[in-house]
Amino acid sequence: MTVATANDRIHLSVAEARALGEAAMRGAGYNDDDARVLTDHVLDAALCGYEYSGLPKLLNVVDDPRFRQPSHGVTVLRETGATALLDGGNTTGMVAAYRATEATIARAQANGLAIVCLANTWMTGRSAYYCEAIARAGLVVIHTVAAPPMVAPFGGARPALGTNPIAFGFPTEGDPLVIDMGTSAFMGTDLQFRDRLGAPIPEGVALGPNGHPTTDASAARRGALLPFGGPEGGYKGFGLALAMDALGALSAGARTEDDVSGYMFMAFKPDLFLSADDYRQEIGKRIETIKATPLRDGVDEIRIPGERGYRTRARLLLEGIEVERKIHDALNRLAEGKFDHGA
């Protein structure tokens, strides 16, 4: 049963959250399968502890200008046995990248390795979601994203690069090792979430439209985020973001001339080099060695990337999640076919 908490947040069981998300996406016009894919993606983010990438992201979908433009589904533009260039057909990114993930797994399992590039889509969500799925299929994966401009280059005052994350997935004897990192100093989805709620952002991560530092989320969305690596915008983050752009350019044949977005999935079977079991054991040994490193004062444990998310997911699958009442009410209105853009 849906419960209102004292601080104006709504508690939902996983089943209630899934039903609300799917109903909202059907209300927005998505078919049952796409509504399921979208909701599973954002619900998994919420369960892993990333509220801003959870149910609020479904509102970001319908707020995006491309949502109101025609779409025609994901198609293959060119291919070999191990490679494919996919045209997303202006399909929502969390659906298009899900299809690209399926294609990557199928081609890598059939050929030993795969490279799948995707463009003409938007808002693909958490890269870790796809990398975990591919790693659970027994594959090593690298996933790169060239996103629309939101981030100023090192020394710049206007956006020229995307938040451009890079992510990795590695099969292990337990949960996959998944490493997912953006190249900006602050997450674009978190920025949109804070703008929606009227909450500030940290200092040193963004510029306003006047090119000066800001902690106002709305001003930052009209200005630019900074690359990671320091209060003035890091050169390392800038370099990685530019590398993601270069890999995204492989998808240029599937995007319009004014679009810089592109997505790449590269996956392969570990048994091209050693047995799958031996590879999983090697990764396990490295993790055990790292976690056994002597700790600095005040540190309880060395936590491997993704470990906190797996623990949080296990707990919240039982406890359920919380969302802001404003988000909950907006999703209910969307389920009724009422579009509150920017609500």
Image: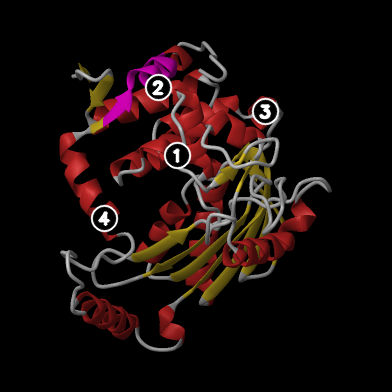
Q: Are marks 1 and 3 in contact (CB under 8 Å)?
A: no
**Residue sticking out furthest to the front:** 212
The span picked out in magenta is: 322-332
Which residue is at the front of the view, 286 or 182? 182
Residue 31 shows in this picture: no
Q: CA distance from mark 3 to mark 4?
A: 34 Å
The three-letter code of the residue at mark 1 reads Val
Counting from the top left corner in percent of width and height, residue 33 is at: 46, 35
Circle nearer the N terminus (1, 4): 1
Q: Which residue matches tag 1?
A: 37
Q: Which residue matches tag 3?
A: 65
Circle nearer the N terminus (3, 4): 3
Q: Secondary structure at mark 4?
A: helix
Question: Number of marks in the image?
Answer: 4
Circle nearer the N terminus (1, 3): 1
The answer to which quarter of the image holds residue 269 is: bottom left
Counting from the top left corner in percent of width and height, residue 132 is at: 38, 59
The three-letter code of the residue at mark 4 reads Arg
Q: Are marks 3 and 4 in contact (CB under 8 Å)?
A: no
Q: CA distance from mark 2 to mark 4?
A: 25 Å
